[in-house]
Amino acid sequence: MDALVLNGDVVDQGLDEQYDSVQKTLNKNKDLLPQTIIKNIGNHEFFDYNIEKNSKDQVQNFINKYLEFSGEEKVYHDKWIKGYHFISLGSEDGNSQTINSVTAFISDEQLEWFKEKLAENYQKGKPIFVFLHQHLDYGDNPWVGSKQSEEIKNILEQYPEVIMFSSHTHRDLNESSVVLNKPFTIVNTGSIHYTIIPDSNEEKGYKRESDYIKGVYIEVNDNNVTIKGRNIKDKEWIFSTEVSN
């Protein structure tokens, strides 16, 4: 395996002890893990349950803790791995007086950077892998994961080679998790803590299942990508979807 991507909400709260715990786990298993580990920011990195709303300074403090953990200079960053571009977007605000606790904020500066990175060494038909913890849309549901979802989609529509991975929703991982031809591809990564399962018998129409531990495994061969859903707990494959450009 060439890389591992932790696509946000790596911690439940953006506290030193939680980052330390994750890092200890990664260090303990370093012989099993790839050298390249991409650590993206989610919404929980802006959480301290003792703080109702973050001030501007508190937001920056949470960002600084994430940057120290991830080894990145900004909440958005990119890497080239074996000739393929991995681009991570990241929220610059969270649980504050200017934005709620779940929605991503992507600045104009980040959007311009994103355009530049997509164009960098671009080859028609060659896959580009994009990551953002929050989703762009949620099917027919009005829940929007990023305040700048439309701006991001408008940029991505110029790049059908893009495969965009989002998390955040805790939706179950199955074949419908891969949406083709948007014109780019969208992948819901599933969750390793708890999964939301539709259930008409529940008051909210769904229930939480903590017994679901799932993720996605990506194989790349030239311009062809295979996306596989994996039940990590039961060590079983769930689905396999081919994406060709």
Image (cartoon, rainbow, N blue to C red):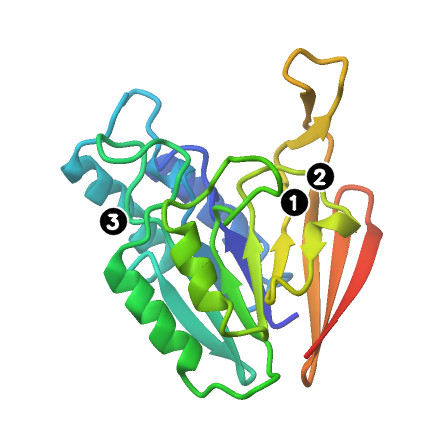
Say left or right for 160 vs 112: right
Query: What residue is shown with label 3?
Result: 64
> Is the C-beta separation of discs 3 and 1 under 8 Å?
no
Q: Is residue 49 above or below residue 71?
A: above
Q: Quadrant of the N terminus?
A: bottom right
Residue 231 shows in the view: no
Q: Dot 2 surroundings within 10 Å: few (below 14), some, or many (20 or more)?
A: many
The front one of 109 and 88 is: 109
Q: Nearer the viewer, residue 108 or 60?
A: 108
Residue depicted at 45% across the width and 56% down the height = 39
Q: Which residue is mark 2?
A: 172
**Which is more toward the observer, 195 or 6?**
195
Q: Which SS class for mark 3?
A: helix
Residue 220, quarter of the rendered image: bottom right
Q: Earlier in the sequence, mark 3 or mark 2?
A: 3
Q: CA distance from mark 2 to mark 1?
A: 6 Å
